[in-house]
Image (cartoon, rainbow, N blue to C red):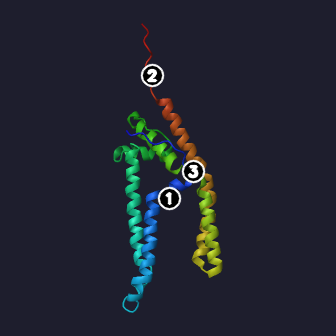
Amino acid sequence: MAPVEERPSSVYDALVPRGSVVLSAVVVASTITWMAVVAPRLEGRASWAATPWPPLVLGMVAMVVHTLKRHRRELEQAGIERGRSGRVVGRALRTGRLPDDRSHDDAIRARVRYARLQTGELTRRSWVIFLVVAAMSLTRGLVNHEVFDLGLAAVCVVMAPVAWRMAPRTVAKWDRLAAELDARRPAPPPEVGD
């Protein structure tokens, strides 16, 4: 199992890894190029192609593929297995209870460490993200008289307290799992004196 790099988690690390920033810049640049160069030539023939949707949809597909590959690579680097062991580990993280089989302890420990490093700060601050999205949607809904944006704002306002309440529980669940794993760790063999 490869050691996981211990570094403080940051909302920015979890949200925007360097590769994702580069891919986002490429998607934005291709959309601008599409709208400036290609779309005017297609205006009379294909109305759907004269919109920013074709490069945006392709860009989103590329971002999803990139994110899935990056996530899989990070899990492998953290020593987290997929398959049966991955299901057991996922159940332990979801329920907060360790399985009776101790053979999964190292995988669970690695997954808890990974979750803390990747999403620890983001989990604690997720309610702020909901409130920011709610404020932006409310502003847009009031300015443009859009019912959808007002509905999205209402949903985000409802989700913010839920996220605020669930985040400490999730972090406490990780702490409880780590403590139980440490308690289950076998005692070191006694040193034999000559």
Q: Residue at x 46, y 77 (%)?
A: 32
Percent coordinates x, y for residue 30 in the rendering: 42, 74
For mark 1, what is the residue? 16
As shown in the figure, which amino acid type bears the numbered disc 3?
Glu
Q: CA–CA distance between discs 2 and 3?
A: 34 Å
Q: Earlier in the sequence, mark 1 or mark 2?
A: 1
Residue 112 higher or lower than 67, as above or below: above
Residue 55 in which image quadrant: bottom left
Q: Earlier in the sequence, mark 1 or mark 3?
A: 1
Q: Residue at x 58, y 47 (%)?
A: 169
Residue contact at pointers 2 and 3, CB within 8 angstroms: no
Percent coordinates x, y for residue 89 in the rendering: 42, 44
Query: Which residue sits furthest left?
Result: 83
Percent coordinates x, y for residue 70 in the rendering: 40, 55
Asked which secondary structure carries label 1, the reply is: loop
- Indicate which disc residue 121 carries: 3
Crowd band around label 2 with a 10 angstrom C-alpha radius: few (<14), some (14–19), many (20+): few
Asked which secondary structure carries label 3, the reply is: helix
Indicate the quadrant containing the C terminus: top left, top right, bottom left or bottom right: top left
Residue 103 in which image quadrant: top left
Residue 162 higher or lower than 87, as above or below: below
Q: CA–CA distance between discs 1 and 2?
A: 41 Å
Indicate the quadrant containing the N terminus: top left, top right, bottom left or bottom right: top left
As shown in the figure, which amino acid type bears the numbered disc 1?
Val
Residue 158 higher or lower than 85, as above or below: below
Q: CA–CA distance between discs 1 and 3?
A: 13 Å
As shown in the figure, which amino acid type bears the numbered disc 2?
Pro
Instruction: Name the side, left or right, on which 170 lies relative to 68.
Output: right
